[in-house]
Image (tube, helix red, strand yellow):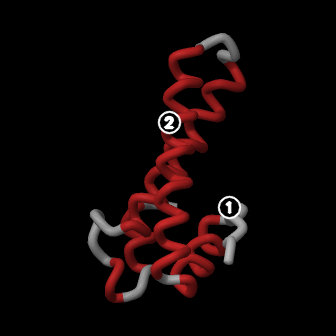
């Protein structure tokens, strides 16, 4: 999915590239690309470290979104096809 297509799918409040939803989308695409790279180059440890940092940042953004806007969080998880975090109450 391209950036323009994703921005069109988002609601009116999430049409800017700086929003949390777009940042999660962008990090998810980078994670997918880096994962495919690491399948071929399994000993590329600097890329592994970068992947871990991206996953941590995406996790923090998902937690922030789940606390502030659960509907948007659930929609984003479904659109991107990523497994969501369990929300603690």
- Residue 67 position, x and y percent, is 52, 76
Residue at screen point 67% across, 78% down: 89
Location of residue 51 with respect to 71 vertically, above or below: above
- Residue placed at 55% from the left, 33% from the top? 51
Numbered disc 1: secondary structure: loop
* Label 1 CA crowd tier, 10 Å (few <14, some 14–19, many 20+): few
Above-or-below relation of 26 to 79: above
Instruction: Classify mark 2: helix, strand or loop.
Output: helix
Q: 66 or 30: which is nearer to us?
A: 66
The spot of residue 58 in percent (x, y) is 51, 52
Mark 1 or mark 2, which is nearer the start of the sequence? 2
Residue at the limit of the structure toward the top, as seen here: 43
Find residue 82 and name its label: 1
Q: Which residue is mark 2?
A: 53
Q: Is residue 68 above or below residue 38?
A: below
* 3D distance between C-alphas at marks 2 and 1: 17 Å
């Amino acid at each position: 999915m391209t950036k323009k297509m994703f921005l069109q799918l988002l609601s009116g409040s999430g049409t800017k590239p700086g929003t949390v939803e777009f940042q999660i989308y962008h990090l998810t695409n980078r994670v997918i690309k880096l994962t495919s790279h690491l399948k071929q180059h399994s000993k590329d440890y600097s890329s592994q470290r970068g992947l871990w940092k991206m996953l941590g940042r995406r996790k923090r953004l998902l937690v922030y979104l789940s606390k502030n806007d659960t509907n948007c969080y659930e929609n984003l998880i479904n659109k991107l096809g990523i497994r969501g975090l369990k929300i603690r109450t």
